[in-house]
Amino acid sequence: PTTPPLRLNDGNTMPQLGYGVWRVSNEDAVACVTEAIKAGYRSIDTAAIYENEEGVGHALAASDIPRNDLFITTKLWNDRRSYDGALSAFDESLKRLKLDFVDLYLIHWPGVSGEGFLDAWRALIRLKEEGRVKSIGVSNFQVKHLRRLIDETGVAPALNQIELHPRFQQKELCAFHAQHGIATECWGPLGQGSLVADEKLAAIGRKYGKTPAQVILRWHLDSGFVVIPKSVTPSRIRENIDVFDFKLDANDMRIIESMDDKGGRVGPDPAVFG
Ligand code: NAD
């Protein structure tokens, strides 16, 4: 399968579907990322805190896919959320990944105090100017954090990576993104596995010969989001990218949109975590 590209506000493009490796060990990351690349994924989402950048790097080094056809994301952890902290943490990530640039570098969490992310952002702007990062963005930012970033630095992130799935759709935040040309990248797209047994989604899937997981991921794509499902099971890794041969109709989209629940968060809340 080929993953369609999505254009970012800085002119770069990224695959609309990628492979996430949270809670994959450094050892397992080698086989999992190799499997994902074999299945057709070209975008890999890791983070310093996942402690598997080395394993990801091994898989990338061993693959015969040209570097420019891959899209590698990593993230700045909270304990380095300062100007100098970000610059040195970035160097360390790059070294572990065995790369000389990453495609996307994200501030992982804004932080409850709101301290530090502006300085870290200024460091990311510098890294982009130096060409060591192609695109820069944030993760788990709320509207107030995004406003501050834009007001104080004049540079909007290329994207915001947030928890987003049928049961937690974050519509207000997405509207803000759209207004400011910020792409929405969805983590926990399958509700971290909690949505794959949903009967409404299964019923939609039966119309197309697709699984609930595939219906969910198709919904993300048809909504214009970037999405990065995770699995360590080869058959599911393949299943999750086998979503480019069908499209949901308007009624399916409405059914899924009606599943939204303000209390449907499955991961940490940036208002109290990070
Ligand atoms: P997810 O929604 O992708 O769910 C993954 C889980 O769903 C798997 O562990 C497995 O149990 C199940 N699953 C996967 N495919 C399946 C299938 N086809 N059928 C049945 N079950 C299936 O959750 P996630 O891993 O939390 O999110 C995806 C990626 O997003 C992560 O790996 C990571 O890269 C990123 N992420 C980022 C943040 C952040 O703060 N920025 C937080 C969490 C995750």
Image: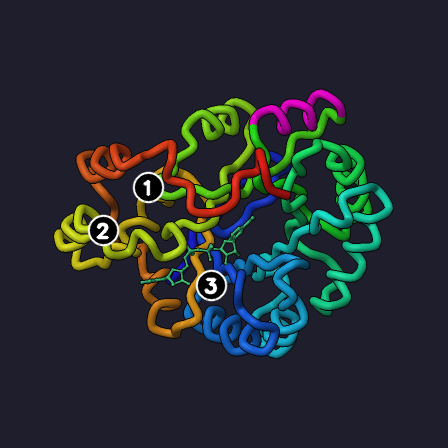
* Quarter assignment of residue 81: top right
The one nearer the camera, 53 or 59, is 53
| Residue 159 seen in the current view | no
Of the four image quadrants, the one with ligand 1 is: bottom left
Q: Which residue is mark 2?
A: 198
Q: Which mark is residue 166?
A: 1
Residue extending farthest to the front is: 272
Above or below: residue 26 compared with residue 202: below
Q: Which residues are magenta?
A: 143-152
Give, as a three-letter code, the residue at label 3. Answer: Tyr
Q: Tag 3, which secondary structure?
A: loop
Question: Where is residue 25 shown, x and y percent of the image?
Answer: 57, 72
Q: Tag 2, which secondary structure?
A: loop
> Can residue 146 be found in the magenta stretch?
yes
Question: Where is residue 137 shown, x and y percent of the image?
Answer: 64, 41
The C terminus - image quarter: top right
Q: Tag 1, which secondary structure?
A: loop
The Cα–Cα distance between marks 3 and 1, rounded to whole angstroms, is: 23 Å
Q: Which residue is mark 3?
A: 41
Judged by its main secondary structure, the magenta piece is helix
Left or right: 210 with respect to 59? Answer: left
Give, as a three-letter code, the residue at label 2. Answer: Asp
The N terminus - image quarter: bottom left
The tally of labels here is 3
Left or right: 253 with respect to 136? Answer: left
Asked if the residues shown at circle 2 and circle 1 are in contact, with their CB atoms under 8 angstroms apart, the answer is yes
The Cα–Cα distance between marks 2 and 1, rounded to whole angstroms, is: 11 Å
